[in-house]
Image: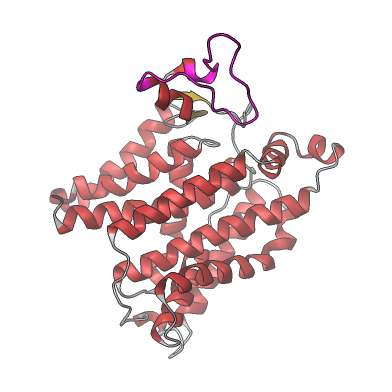
Amino acid sequence: MLSNYHQSVLTLMSINVVAVTGVALLTGFTGLFSFGHAGYMSIGAYTAAMLVVRAKLPFLLALPLGGAMACLVSLIMYPTLRLKGDYFAIAALGFGEAVRLIMDNGGTFTGGARGFPGIPTMTRLPVALVFAALALYFMRNILYSRFGRALIAIREDRLAAQSLGINVAHSQMMSLAISAFYCGTAGGLFAFFMSFVQPRMFDMAKSTELASSIVFGGLGSLTGSAVAAGILTSIPEVFRPLMTWRMVFYGLALVLTIVLRPSGLLGTWELSVNGILKVFGVSRDWTPGSRPPAGTGAGAAGATGGLGPRTPGRSGGGK
């Protein structure tokens, strides 16, 4: 039986998995590096909290509405999608800080620097786990869809993707909107977990934490991003008895991973259904669009064990 403390840590890990999954779509699979997704989390957090506290909407309805608001606000970033590399990252950083300052100077509407208190605690561990599982499931389906493969093509070579008839600007905007929805929903879960929200909870450090999880787990690996979100959330808690020194271990883990594994913790590998079935002695190819080989029924990806090569492939690295 888990103590309340361990349940809280697991709940926070699940919330971060939802947010990091959204950032992974934009940074890992579309190639747009962002340092401003804490802004979308704050929009979702404040929107969901106000809808429940002031408009008396149900909790489970307010969460997607918070994500939808973050998704809607992300449309103002459309002109910045023409920027490449570091320029988009700087624009995203400016957006995140602008949202935080708006919340900080929102007066009685947002609570200002004192924050928005009185939010009922509704994000329990089962709720957070369900949202994390749904986030990974739907993101996996997005990545294996025609749209997901178009995003990967844009990441690998923007001009080549455009020459193949892919609407680059529209695809990038859709990727940004979906990632903002994920982060907005995670922000709502976070607000109902903490029971209050403050602008400083969503500052540049939070955006950096989300981006670090993507690099730590492996750019372009959904499994790696989820694992990294869990590890980086747990490290400060594991070393909590060391007080302020615990953050040193957080930074040390990041530095060692980048030095020893520049491609991230899991590189370009994904957890595959075939690998899981193989562990239990079941051989069947569940790779989307594939057929089991005649006679054996064993899939090629199933022969790789619990981890298999990622189907939406990546030949290059970086943003």
Relative side of 249 to 241, left or right: right
- Is residue 210 at least partly visible in the picture? no
Q: Nearer the viewer, residue 6 or 233?
A: 6
Q: Which picture quadrant has residue 220? A: top right
Residue at x 59%, y 28% (from the top left corner): 311
Q: Indicate whether residue 294 is drawn in magenta.
A: yes
- Is residue 281 at least partly visible in the picture? yes
The structure's colour scheme is secondary structure
Q: How many marks?
A: 0
Looking at the image, residue 183 lies above or below residue 261: below
* Residue 150 place in picture, x, y as percent: 72, 40
Looking at the image, residue 100 lies above or below residue 138: below
Which quadrant, please, contains the C terminus?
top right
Looking at the image, residue 103 lies above or below residue 19: below
**Residue located farthest toward the front when viewing the structure as drawn:** 295
* Magenta-drawn stretch, dominant element (helix, strand or loop): loop
Residue at x 41%, y 20% (from the top left corner): 282
Q: Nearer the viewer, residue 194 or 312?
A: 312
Q: Report the magenta residues as a range.
A: 279-302
* Residue 297 place in picture, x, y as percent: 53, 15
* Residue 189 place in picture, x, y as percent: 39, 65
Q: Nearer the viewer, residue 75 or 150?
A: 150
Q: Which picture quadrant has residue 160? A: top right
Residue at x 30%, y 44% (from the top left corner): 250
Relative side of 83 to 216, left or right: right
Relative side of 310 to 266, left or right: right
Q: Nearer the viewer, residue 25 or 213?
A: 25
